Amino acid sequence: MLIVNSIYHKFFVKTKNRDERNVRIENMAKAKAFDVIGIVFGIITIIYILLKSNILIILLTTLAYLFI
């Protein structure tokens, strides 16, 4: 029950204690995740090309890579 309660408060209850340090840490974590996703989409696209996958799948992953 403790785990469910902590997950609930982390994601659904917005606290008013939003100081600059916490906001900066959260923004840096989001930026790092965005960079990782860009690399992952690039690698997935290259893998699909090397496996000679369906052209539709290759185009969709390329579009996803371009629009993130």
Image: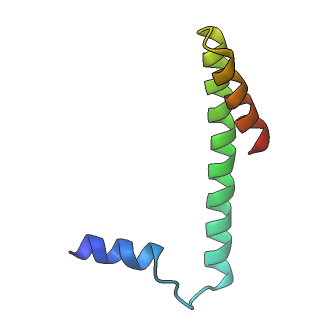
43 is higher (above) or lower (below) than 20: above
Identity of the residue drawn at 60% across and 13% down: 53
Image color mode:
rainbow
34 is higher (above) or lower (below) than 30: above
Q: Position of residue 52 (x, y in %)?
A: 63, 8
Identity of the residue drawn at 67% across and 66% down: 27
In the picture, the quarter occupied by the N terminus is bottom left
Question: Where on the picture, by quarter, is residue 24?
Answer: bottom right
Q: Nearer the viewer, residue 39 or 55?
A: 55
In the picture, the quarter occupied by the C terminus is top right
14 relative to 29 in the view: left or right: left
Identity of the residue furthest to the left in this view: 1
39 is higher (above) or lower (below) than 29: above
Identity of the residue drawn at 56% across and 89% down: 17
Q: Nearer the viewer, residue 48 or 57?
A: 57
Number of marks: 0
13 relative to 52 in the view: left or right: left
60 is higher (above) or lower (below) than 67: above
Q: Position of residue 12 (x, y in %)?
A: 46, 77
Identity of the residue furthest to the front in this view: 56
Identity of the residue drawn at 62% across and 51% down: 33
Q: Position of residue 3 (x, y in %)?
A: 27, 70
Identity of the residue furthest to the bottom in this view: 16
Question: Where on the picture, by quarter, is residue 20?
Answer: bottom right
Question: Where on the picture, by quarter, is residue 25?
Answer: bottom right
Q: Position of residue 7 (x, y in %)?
A: 37, 71
